[in-house]
């Protein structure tokens, strides 16, 4: 994780309202900090340039230029290269590249597993088991995650629906027993955040899957699952999230094993009919 992300997470609760506004903007729009002077960033936020400088000093930087250099490095060099999979020197010589990548993913999955609250995981599976309907949303590269989770939940008998931005104009259903699962990773989509805001207004339970404990979705989520990875790269996200989703669906299956078994049989029968045109 980049240093400025770590520093924001560590100090976020102690920041003033104004400094939190700057922190949230940096998390949502790091390019604005990378490409603009402090004065222009302040104008975009409707805060003073001195507020931007104070934010940098609060995080431990000597000034705006030091923070900007780090953010620029993150924005313009956010890509994975071979050296981003460091084991020991001896291990690097012995391990093939594909094994190094997969071991790196394993490390990220383990880090996330150790940081997930068992209490929240149990609460999430119980909430989903009791839900009347579940809406799942993820845009851009998280759409495949939301698509897989929708199918997996349907396969075990959960009334799950995939949010499709090209078809769904608004949330046209809802009750207190509706659940909204939202994937929100950097750069955070405003559309999913607006959906979460509306779901919150309707008193739905919101489960957020994101990349930071202080990501924008955190202020809406009733249950929040941050995933952790050493580099904030999109390519690293999928292995961790899919592993977590598998754990979530498996945990939910145990809530009602009989329903899971019956629905899997129904899904398999449908699959066979579609495959062999019976």
Image (tube, rainbow, N blue to C red):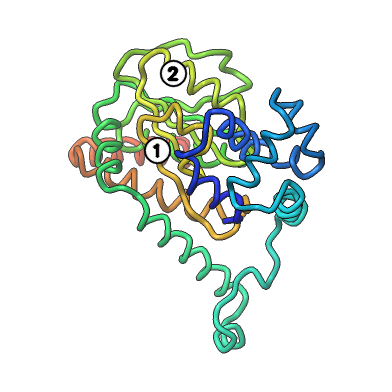
- In the picture, residue 144 is in which quadrant? top right
Q: Residue at x 23, y 41 (%)?
A: 261
Q: Is residue 156 above or below residue 106?
A: above
Q: Is residue 177 visible?
A: yes
The local secondary structure at tag 1 comes to strand
Indicate which disc residue 277 carries: none
- Residue 200's spot in the image, x, y percent? 42, 19
Name the one closer to the observer, 238 or 111: 111
- Residue 22's spot in the image, x, y percent? 63, 34
Q: Residue at x 65, y 45 (%)?
A: 56
Q: Is residue 147 visible?
A: no
Q: Is residue 51 above or below residue 79?
A: above
Horizontally, residue 274 falls left or right of residue 27, namely: left
The local secondary structure at tag 2 comes to helix
- Residue 50's spot in the image, x, y percent? 71, 35
Q: The C terminus lies in which quarter of the figure?
A: top left
Q: Residue at x 68, y 62 (%)?
A: 80
- In the picture, residue 180 is in which quadrant? top left
Which residue, given by chain and number where applicable, does mark 2 sit on?
Answer: 199
- In the picture, residue 101 is in which quadrant? bottom right
Name the one closer to the observer, 229 or 32: 32
In this view, which residue lies farthest toward the top? Answer: 172
- Residue 156's spot in the image, x, y percent? 31, 37
Horizontally, residue 32 falls left or right of residue 141, namely: right
Name the one closer to the observer, 154 or 224: 224
Mark 1 → mark 2, Cα distance in angstroms: 15 Å
Which residue, given by chain and number where applicable, does mark 1 sit on?
Answer: 224
Mark 1 or mark 2, earlier in chain = 2
């Amino acid at each position: 994780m980049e240093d400025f992300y770590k520093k924001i997470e560590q100090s976020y609760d102690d920041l003033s309202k104004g400094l939190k506004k700057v922190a949230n903007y940096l998390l949502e729009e790091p390019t604005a900090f990378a490409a603009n002077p402090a004065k222009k960033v302040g104008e975009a936020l409707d805060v003073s340039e001195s507020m931007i400088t104070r934010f940098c000093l609060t995080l431990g930087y000597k000034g705006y230029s030091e923070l900007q250099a780090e953010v620029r490095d993150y924005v313009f060099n956010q890509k994975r290269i071979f050296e981003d999979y460091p084991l020991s020197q001896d291990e690097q010589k012995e391990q093939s590249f594909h094994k190094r990548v997969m071991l790196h993913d394993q490390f990220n999955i383990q880090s996330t597993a150790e940081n997930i609250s068992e209490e929240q995981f149990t609460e999430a599976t119980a909430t989903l088991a009791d839900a009347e309907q579940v809406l799942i949303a993820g845009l851009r590269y998280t759409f495949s995650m939301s698509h897989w989770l929708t199918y997996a939940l349907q396969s075990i008998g959960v009334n799950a629906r995939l949010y499709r931005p090209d078809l769904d104009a608004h949330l046209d259903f809802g009750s207190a027993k509706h659940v909204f699962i939202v994937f929100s990773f950097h750069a955070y989509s405003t559309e999913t955040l607006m959906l979460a805001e509306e779901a919150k207004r309707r008193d739905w339970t919101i489960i957020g899957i994101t990349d930071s404990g202080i990501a924008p979705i955190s202020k809406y989520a009733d249950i929040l699952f941050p995933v952790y990875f050493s580099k904030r790269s999109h390519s690293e996200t999928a292995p961790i999230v899919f592993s977590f989703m598998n754990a979530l669906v498996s945990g939910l299956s145990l809530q009602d094993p009989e329903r899971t078994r019956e629905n899997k049989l129904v899904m398999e029968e449908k699959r066979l009919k579609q495959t062999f045109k019976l």
